[in-house]
């Protein structure tokens, strides 16, 4: 009898339609993952990512929802994870609303914390039981160098990203015995829409490698954390920042 083919693993990439998230989707697709790609509202970008992933031999389901809305997350992901547990969860959702704290409006603070930090709770809380039941999985949380060293004008963003580090490290202590590996990747200045308007002449002197990072630089580390079979890295923060933060 011909043995049945081994089912492809599923990666849930939250915030996968653009920038770093897009690069992660495509890198994991190349590594043999099928993708659940979530996004908020840019349908055109999401469809483009799906088409690219499919050319790499992956299936790519598009799942639109607002990560800051717990009930929306539950409605979108709950029925899926009752039937199938993703092997990998990559939490990449994030927004910025930069301002000096003395001028920051409550809605600027709240919007960033709701998306970047509350969204992690909303998604992970929804998915985690299925991973615990399967007794296997990888969780990778995308934080930021801002969450490690701070950044003027980003008190809200840095707070949310530092919160992700603490949350992921605590989660690692909770689920490691269930064969679920949790790590954090903290990018520095990466060439994306989010950093497009930042003047490079002010950034590059701070970066020992003297260049901005690429989304693929981050995706390669995420891919390693999601695919390496002999992995003894758990609860760690891995900087992808060209030496900006150590």
Image (cartoon, rainbow, N blue to C red):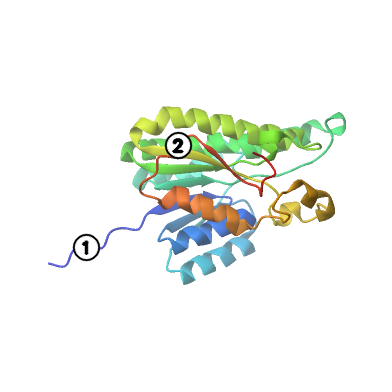
Question: Which of these two is toward me, 69 or 165?
Answer: 165
Q: Earlier in the sequence, mark 2 or mark 1?
A: 1
* In the displayed structure image, the side of residue 9 where residue 113 appears, left or right: right
Question: Which of these two is toward me, 151 or 50?
Answer: 151
Q: Which of the 4 image quarters holds residue 121?
A: top right
Cα separation, mark 2 vs mark 1, equals: 33 Å
* In the displayed structure image, the side of residue 117 where residue 60 appears, left or right: left
Q: In which quadrant is the C terminus drawn?
A: top right
Q: Is residue 16 visible?
A: no
The residue that appears at 51% across and 31% down in the rendered structure is: 169
User: Label for residue 234?
Assistant: 2
The residue that appears at 46% across and 69% down in the rendered structure is: 56
Marks 2 and 1 close (CB-CB < 8 Å): no
User: Label for residue 99?
Assistant: none
User: Label for residue 4?
Assistant: 1
- Name the secondary structure under disc 1: loop
Local packing at callout 1 (Cα closer than 10 Å; few below 14, some 14-19, many 20+) is few
In the rendered image, the vertical position of residue 142 relative to residue 23, given as above or below: above
């Amino acid at each position: 009898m011909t043995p049945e083919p081994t089912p492809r693993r599923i990666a849930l990439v939250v915030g996968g339609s653009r920038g770093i998230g897009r690069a992660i989707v495509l890198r994991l697709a190349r590594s043999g993952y099928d993708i659940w790609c979530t996004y908020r509202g840019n349908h055109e970008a999401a469809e483009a990512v799906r088409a690219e992933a499919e050319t790499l031999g992956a299936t790519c389901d598009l799942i639109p929802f607002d990560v800051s809305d717990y009930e929306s997350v539950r409605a979108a992901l709950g029925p899926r994870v009752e039937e199938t547990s993703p092997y990998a969860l990559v939490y990449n959702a994030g927004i910025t609303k930069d301002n000096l704290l003395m001028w920051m409006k409550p809605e600027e603070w709240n919007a960033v914390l709701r998306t970047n930090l509350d969204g992690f709770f909303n998604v992970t809380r929804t998915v985690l039981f299925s991973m615990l039941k399967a007794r296997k999985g990888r969780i990778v949380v995308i934080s930021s160098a801002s969450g490690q060293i701070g950044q003027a004008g980003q008190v809200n963003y840095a707070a949310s990203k530092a919160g992700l580090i603490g949350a992921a490290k605590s989660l690692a202590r909770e689920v490691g015995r269930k064969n679920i590996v949790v790590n954090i990747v903290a990018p520095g200045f990466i060439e994306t829409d989010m950093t497009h308007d930042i003047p490079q002449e002010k950034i590059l002197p701070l970066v020992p490698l003297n260049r901005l990072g690429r989304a693929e630089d981050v995706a390669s580390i995420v891919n390693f954390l999601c695919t390496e079979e002999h992995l003894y890295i758990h609860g760690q923060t891995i900087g992808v920042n060209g030496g900006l933060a150590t």
